[in-house]
Amino acid sequence: MNTHGAARALSTRGRASIRIVDGVTEEYLASARKTMDAESAAQELVERTGG
């Protein structure tokens, strides 16, 4: 279930790094396109970018 605001923690094994970016990364958009229909992915982009 992909619910806006549902994620609160991320568990990882091994090394991880965090990078703060402005906007939405291409990697996120590519992932969204794989798991959502086109309309849902477009709506997610609008919500994440504020319009």
Image (tube, grey):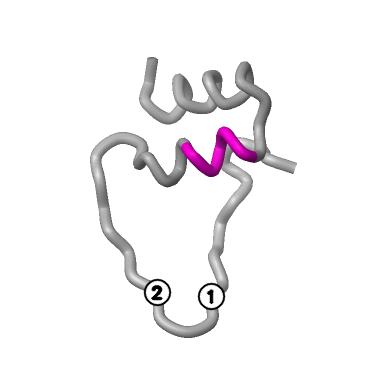
Task: Please rate how many residues cluster around mark 2, counting C-alpha atoms within 10 Å: few if below 14, some from 14 to 19, many from 20.
Answer: few
Residue 16: where, in percent of width, then height? 39, 74
Q: Are the residues flagged by discs 2 and 1 in contact, CB closer than 8 Å?
A: yes
The residue singled out by tag 2 in the image is 16
Q: CA distance from mark 2 to mark 1?
A: 7 Å
Q: For residue 40, which numbered disc appears in the image?
A: none
Q: Magenta stretch? A: 30-34
When the figure is inspected, residue 44 is found, relative to residue 32, above or below; the finding is above
Residue found at x 59% / y 52%: 7
What element does badge 2 sit on?
loop
The residue singled out by tag 1 in the image is 12
Quarter of the rendering occupied by the N terminus: top right
Extreme residue toward the right, this view: 1
Residue found at x 55% / y 20%: 43
Q: Residue flagged by tag 2: what amino acid is it?
A: Ala
When the figure is inspected, residue 19 is found, relative to residue 43, above or below; the finding is below
